Amino acid sequence: MPTQLAEVEIFRPLPEDGLEALAMRGKHHRYEPGEVLLRQGDLSETMHVLLTGRVRVERDQSEEGTVLLTELGPNEVVGEMGVLDHAPRSATVTAIEATETLELHATALAVVLIQYPAVAAILLRTLSRRLRGADELVEQLARESH
């Protein structure tokens, strides 16, 4: 599994021993299609590295219904925002095909960020891209509603 973690953008700066330590700290999970990995509003203490499969990330907007934010696949991460800010989950993540993940607790990620600052820089870029994508989605939805 350390080899597969090396394929995940945010963990590329980690040396082999760092990848091995991270893999040992994580919990392996398997989700069937339709199973929820993370639920909007829940506590945010972990993130998932997607090893196989695909997930759908959706946000419940009450009156407007559910908005599809994105779909993610292998070697991507989900749940990283909540791990960083400890705020409730901002979206629900559901498996859309059989999916395997490595769940990492906030403390494991914190150790990695302290030991390897380059990981923090990549994580910030990932968050920035996702925020930019969410902004574009909001703009598109606003245009469609007029």
Image (spheres, grey):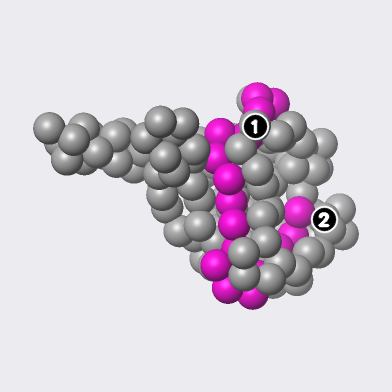
Q: Between residues 105 and 35, which one lies in front from this camera angle? A: 35
Image quadrant containing the N terminus: bottom right
Q: Quadrant of residue 86?
A: top right
Whether residue 70 is situated above or below residue 91 in the rendered picture: below
Q: Describe residue 125's horizontal placement relative to residue 28 as left or right.
A: left
Query: Callout 2: few (<14), some (14-19), or many (20+) C-alpha neighbours within 10 Å?
Result: some
Question: On the image, numbered disc 2 is attached to which residue?
Answer: 26
Magenta range: 86-103
x and y, in percent, of residue 55 in the image: 55, 61
Mark 1 lies on a secondary structure that is loop
Q: Between residues 67 and 47, which one lies in front from this camera angle? A: 67
Q: Between residues 11 and 65, which one lies in front from this camera angle? A: 65
Q: Quadrant of residue 74?
A: bottom right
x and y, in percent, of residue 70 in the image: 42, 52
Q: Describe residue 21's horizontal placement relative to residue 133 as left or right.
A: right
Residue 65 part of the magenta-drawn span:
no
Instruction: Please tell me which of labels 2 and 1 falls first in the chain.
Output: 2
Task: Judge depth for marks 2 and 1 and give the one in front.
Answer: 1
Image quadrant containing the C terminus: top left
**Residue 32 appears in view:** yes
Whether residue 27 is situated above or below residue 78 in the rendered picture: below
Give residue 99's mark. none
Q: Residue at coordinates 68% horizontally, 54% vertically from top-left?
A: 37
Q: Between residues 83 and 24, which one lies in front from this camera angle? A: 83
Query: Callout 1: few (<14), some (14-19), or many (20+) C-alpha neighbours within 10 Å?
Result: few
Residue 100 part of the magenta-drawn span:
yes
Question: On the image, numbered disc 1 is attached to which residue?
Answer: 41
x and y, in percent, of residue 106 in the image: 77, 37
What amino acid is at disc 1?
A: Gly
Q: How many labels, in total? A: 2
Residue at the left extreme of this rendering:
146
